Image: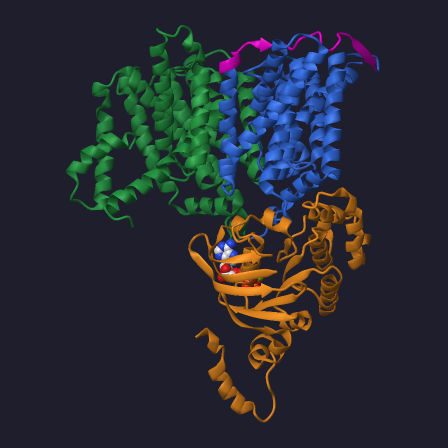
Amino acid sequence: MLWVNNIEVVYMEVILVLKGVSLEVHEGAIVSLLGANGGGKSTTLKAISGLLKPEEGEVTDGNIEFNDIRIDNKGPEDIARMGIVQVMEGRRIFEHLSTEENLKAGAHIRGDGSSLKHDLDMVYNYFPKLRDLRHSTSGYLSGGEQQMLVMGRAMMANPSLMLLDEPSLGLAPLLVQEIYNIVLRINSEEKTSILLVEQNVRAALSIATYGYVMENGKVVFDGEAEKLRDNEDIQEFYMGLSHMGKQKSYREVKHYKRRKRWLG
Amino acid sequence: MMIVETVIYGLVVGAVYGVVALGFVLIYKSSSVLNLAQGSLLMLGGFICLQISQWLPGGVWFFILAVFITLVIATLIGFSVERLALRPLIGEPLISVIMMTIGLNVLLGGIGYAIWGSGNFPYPTDIIPIGSVSILGTPISYKYIFSLIIALLCVVFFILFFQFTRSGIAMRATADDQLAAQSLGISTSQIFRYAWAIGCITAAIGGIIIGFLIGLNSYNTPVLGLRVLPVVLLGGLDSIPGAIIGGLIVGVTENLAGAYLDPIVGGGMRDLFPYILIIIILMVKPYGLFGWVRIERI
Amino acid sequence: MHNPCGVFNETYEQDLAIFRTKTQWGLLIGAIIIAFTFPLFLNSYILGVLIQIFATIIILHGLNILTGYCGQISLAQAAFAAVGGYTSALLSEWALGAALPEWFPGIFNFWITVPIAGLTAGAIGVLFGIPALRLRGFYLVMATLAAHFIIIYIIVHTIGTQAQTLPAPHLFGLLLNNSQSYYYVVLVALIALSYVAKNLVRTRFGRAWIAIRDNDLAAEVMGISLFRYKLSAFFIGCLFAGLGGALWAHYTRSITPEYYHLTYGLWYLGYIIVGGMGSALGPFFGASFLIILTQGLAEVISALSGTFYGIESYLSAAREVLFGLVVVLFMILEPRGIAHRWNLFKAYYRLFPYAH
Ligand SMILES: Nc1ncnc2c1ncn2[C@@H]1O[C@H](COP(=O)(O)OP(=O)(O)OP(=O)(O)O)[C@@H](O)[C@H]1O
Ligand SMILES: [Mg+2]
């Protein structure tokens, strides 16, 4: 459903951030986008959702197609209307609005008032905590509750593709697990495809079907989630595992040579 | 009984301030622009309505028609001001925005002055019946009652609008976080356009009320726009109820100051007191009584 | 300086082969020399306009420091100019009227009252700067607006709305009561004060102001005392306003509160924006451009008044429309003002014929 075709992104007409990124997300898939800080993951999401424009960024090469329609020169409103909603990094709730008003703002593009109640119930069903907090000012919610709120808010737009940027940022492991379970449920029950950006590689690969690894504005690895999980480079550089045992010294020599050789 | 009378008149004047202050707050809330051109918009709205009503045959119904036409024109003015003047300034620093609205104020004021000259223009007296009702033993003329009702209607309307409608919530969301609003498909440029339209509409309503109360004047009416600034800041720049409460406080205190301080200091206190009040309030509460305290990080 | 085009041509031919810095020196000295010869061939009307421009530039230097460098947007500059004008007027009057020793009124002359006027305006500026310490953005704008109204109120209610007269200055026994002679007073003041203003922003004060403008919270955390530096900006800004206001008042020789209407406070802000905020040249460009433009408009309208009967009554409206239009257009097309264009032009000229 989503094709990102060799795109190049430039900020403020000078800062080249993405240098030819390609990826695809199929109907109903959970695809995760991994990589070190500053690799360009958020930029890729913003290129897809059209939010580059307000930040003075631009797709200068390549193209992005969603359901066979080119979207790389459309504004964020149009793209959201087509069914792609991004949940931005850093829990950007509308802090002076109540929880329920935040959710209503999420349903803005829908316009049909009749299903609003139904959708609110659906979100509260996924995130029961939000129901109890629905009249409180969202600025005072805890970090975890705010993360649930922004995800619920995005669901209110009834997207066919949800772009999630680091939903686990700063959350306790148990809560991360909870959020991920909900992501899985949303994917299977609402038939929403998901493109998930994560630092938490292990967690991301545990729910994803396919993964891409980005570094310095390029995709350096991609493959089925299982393959990535078993890949030694990924394990060493992104999951922090190292291979213990008698081969250790030999490994270390080899490791030295192998260190991120794809960067060279 | 003097004090009762003073307070009641203060409340009426305060309600009018409240309506005009609403225009400021609405524009500020959705686009973070303090519109210093509100005074000229006020004057233009009042004059346009008067002019149209003079072209139409007399009578209450035609006057109401004139009001509606005025509101349509005000909407168009709002759209064009936003498009031509404010849109190019997105991302520019505060001073540019302030200066732009000051420039607009001077420009629109000059245009009004060029068209209508410097005279005093009272509104027709046959629209609102002459006479008064007695409140707590004080006669209050109908035009004040009428102004109060219109002001309260506006307030209730906008509170409901922002609390319960789709566009109202979208406008508040945009005020909170533009980028997040865009990510949800809310068109911020559309929101700004609406905010300016609403701001101009409230200005026009304010201008019409002022026309009934004291008449219009191309020199003094724009200054009334500045007079409302203490009201806005008192209530806090982003609070709708704050605009109204601020309006009432300023209306009452300036009337009291006029009644009780003028004999001591020799006049003029009514005009000055709001500014003294605002200095005192800002020293104690730098974000007004109900304004959002911006959380700042380095 | 105040007349860049003409001056530029002169020295361009003379100093073509000299270093850039020397070119600048040449430009400066050339401009000053030419400015000194103006009274020899310009009539008093034009000299009057020049005096107005110079006094305005002095006032704008203050606003430029306060708003352009320290970031404290002020609408009250006209009121502080009023403080200057009225202080000098009252001091002169008091010295004449009071039962003072024979020699004493002579000491309270122009050369003393004008600096006192400046200091008074500065002190009152500090007074209003104190509530402004914690304020930012629109809230500060509001406080300065309140300051304007309060100051004008006090003037109206203690001194009154009737015209206040001021004496012309004496120098070495000469009475400087015409445009030709008074022009030199204002010109020298302008040169000295421009020098002070330009150098102030390069001291530790200037650096602290800029830090406060760019981020007052960060500046404070870095150890810059907001109290000290914000108030010093208010002091300097209002000092210049007082000096400029007093100099102008001694030229018109008669002032009323109408001379210091809020409109002028707004216009001053417009001048520095059009000229270029936070640039030492901004006040020169802004005041010259806009004052010449509005004076030109007045000329055009009075020239047309023969053919179009009653057109003069539109003068003040037309002036407002023109001013508003210029400000609005500048905000849209060149928010950084003429000074920025001037820098671009200089760079272009220096690098010609290459683009970079
Ligand atoms: N608005 C912008 N203007 C200029 N440069 C930007 C902008 N946004 C991001 N960048 C630069 O683009 C690069 C990639 O940023 P991006 O936010 O896409 O990284 P990321 O992979 O999401 O990192 P993280 O995991 O830390 O969130 C960074 O070097 C960043 O400095
Ligand atoms: Mg990121």
Nearer to me, C276 or A157: A157
For this view, does B228 lie left or right of residue B81? right
- Segment colored magenta: B114-135
Label tally: 0
Query: On screen, A71 above or below B50?
Result: below
Q: Quadrant of residue B279?
A: top right
Asked whether residue B296 is drawn in magenta, I would say no
- In the image, residue C316 lies at what x, y percent? 45, 16
- In the image, residue B238 lies at what x, y percent? 66, 37
Say which chain is green.
C
Residue at the spot 66% in from the left edge and 40% down from the top edge: B171
> Quick one: quadrant of the N terminus of chain C?
top left
Residue at the spot 65% in from the left edge and 16% down from the top edge: B66
Residue C108 visible in the picture: no
Farthest residue toward the front?
Answer: A68
Nearer to me, A22 or B38: A22
Farthest residue toward the bottom?
Answer: A246
Scheme by which the image is coloured: by chain
Nearer to me, B71 or C242: B71
- In the image, residue C58 lies at what x, y percent? 38, 30
Residue C249 visible in the picture: yes
Q: Colour of chain A?
A: orange
Q: Quadrant of residue B58?
A: top right
Say which chain is blue.
B
Farthest residue toward the right?
Answer: B136
For this view, does C281 lie left or right of residue A250? left
Asked whether residue B120 is drawn in magenta, I would say yes
- In the image, residue C59 lies at what x, y percent? 41, 29
